Image (cartoon, rainbow, N blue to C red):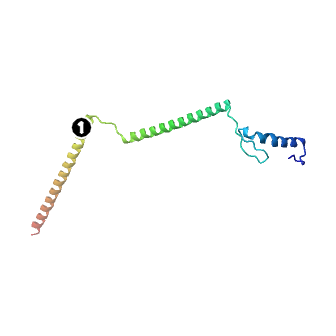
Amino acid sequence: MIDPKAKSSSALLKTFLEGHFIKSLQPYIKFNLKTGKGSSAPRHWPESEIDRVIKEKKEEKRRKEEEERRLAEERRKQEAEQVRMKEEDTDALEWEEVFAIRKRLEEEEEARKRKEQEDLEDGEKDEDEDNSDEDEDEEDDD
């Protein structure tokens, strides 16, 4: 059981302690102690009061940042919605303004109709004058 090739008394003592005490006390130990150089098992220590306080502060800071980010996003969306609403909406007009606009549109329509009527009448007069000129030319030729 004792390795005769051990070069120092500390190595011999370490081997003895690992062989007898640690192996026999393994069922009573709550965390795993791996012996040997190839051991890469992470150790888990109980959380201290300071660790708990630090963890709570980090969590609180993360929650505050998340809340600030969420509020900033909500504000940005509201501003974008208000800009969009301003582009879509126009101010409501008073009934006097609506009446004035309707009256102006009616007057413009009447003026357009009068102009078309005058253009038609001028066109007929021109045709009549052209026809009468042609009649006079025919009489002159005779």
**Residue name at image x 26 percent, y 35 percent:** 95
**Residue name at image x 19 percent, y 49 percent:** 113
Looking at this view, is 81 or 140 the one in front? 81
Looking at this view, is 21 or 129 the one in front? 21
User: What is the quadrant of residue 99 in the picture?
Assistant: top left
Asked which secondary structure carries label 1, the reply is: helix
Q: Position of residue 19 (x, y in %)?
A: 81, 43
Location of residue 49 with respect to 10 vertically, above or below: above
Looking at the figure, which quarter contains the C terminus?
Answer: bottom left
Judged left or right of residue 48, residue 88 is: left
Q: Position of residue 49 (x, y in %)?
A: 67, 30
Judged left or right of residue 99, residue 137 is: left
Residue matched to label 1? 99
Judged left or right of residue 24, residue 108 is: left
Judged left or right of residue 66, residue 49 is: right
Looking at this view, is 90 or 22 the one in front? 22
